[in-house]
Image (spheres, grey):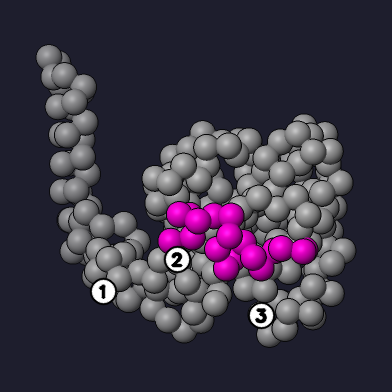
Amino acid sequence: MISGMNPESGAKLKNKLRYVLRGCLDVIAPRRCVACGRRLSCTEEYVCAVCLKHAPVTGFQTDPYENVMAKDFWGLVRQMEKAAAWFYYEPGSEFSNIIKELKYRHQPALGLYIGEMMAHKMNESGFFDDIDYMIPVPVTRKRKRQRGYNQAECIANGIQRVVPIPVATWAVERVEFDGSQTQLGRLDRMDNVGHAFRGKDMEALSHAHVLLVDDVTTTGATLTAVANVLQKVPDIRISVLTAGYTR
């Protein structure tokens, strides 16, 4: 910082210099919106302002206990508390491209961005107020090596930048994987992941309220499988938050 400059002025100068540098770099290698492909301005991150304005947001956080997503888990997860998702996920739609980019284009930083955006949106309604731990849905070691990261963990880490909730990657692990879930129906998905997870160090979760974090809820099979493992913990409460929700 320049001598004699107060911290607020220093931060403004730092941001100004960052935008100038980004503008110069964008001339050489323009950044594109991961949703629509439009060129981003120097003040935009990953998703352009137009796509954010017209994003198919669910608004589930305003009624987290009885929205359609929460009802998907009724009868499947005994200790279910609440559920929410940022946007409606529709394969092939522009905004849903952000999940494709996160999972298949090696963009872990995009996961952090998604988590931050979700956290700001959900935090307005107090969604995180009573959460003790976040548990990102784990992937197999093989899948993590192939992708280089767990996209759910990236999202959880992004949320943590906004709300200081511990990310409990130590609680549950994935022990098997019988292929992609993409082309399977609800019952087949349930069978495919029914025994795919096991608890590791779950003692600390006793009497806690945990938030399962993942990229997309389609049938809820994977999240239900993780929840069934966690239900062995005494007096645990379980909630769910994902970036996308398939209608």
The magenta stretch spans residue 62: yes
Q: Amino acid at mark 2?
A: Thr
Q: Secondary structure at mark 2?
A: loop
Along the horizontal axis of the image, is 205 left or right of 85?
right
**Residue 38 image label:** 1
Q: Are marks 3 and 2 in contact (CB under 8 Å)?
A: no
Q: Amino acid at mark 3?
A: Thr
Q: Amino acid at mark 1?
A: Arg
Observer-nearest residue: 208 or 203? 208
Asked which quadrant contains residue 200, the reply is top right
Residue 174 visible at all: no
**Residue 58 image label:** 2
**Residue 182 image label:** 3
**Residue 86 image label:** none
Cα gap from disc 1 to disc 2, whole angstroms: 24 Å
Query: Start and end of the magenta stretch?
Result: 59-76
Classify 10 Å Cα crowding around label 1: few (below 14), some (14-19), many (20 and above).
some
Label 3 vs 2, first from the N-terminus: 2
Image height of 87 relative to 23, above or below: below
> Which residue is drawn at the image coordinates 22% and 44% (left, top)?
18
Q: Secondary structure at mark 3?
A: loop
The magenta stretch spans residue 168: no
Classify 10 Å Cα crowding around label 2: few (below 14), some (14-19), many (20 and above).
some
Observer-side mark, 3 or 2, equals: 2
Label 1 vs 2, first from the N-terminus: 1
Q: Position of residue 224 (x, y in %)?
A: 75, 62
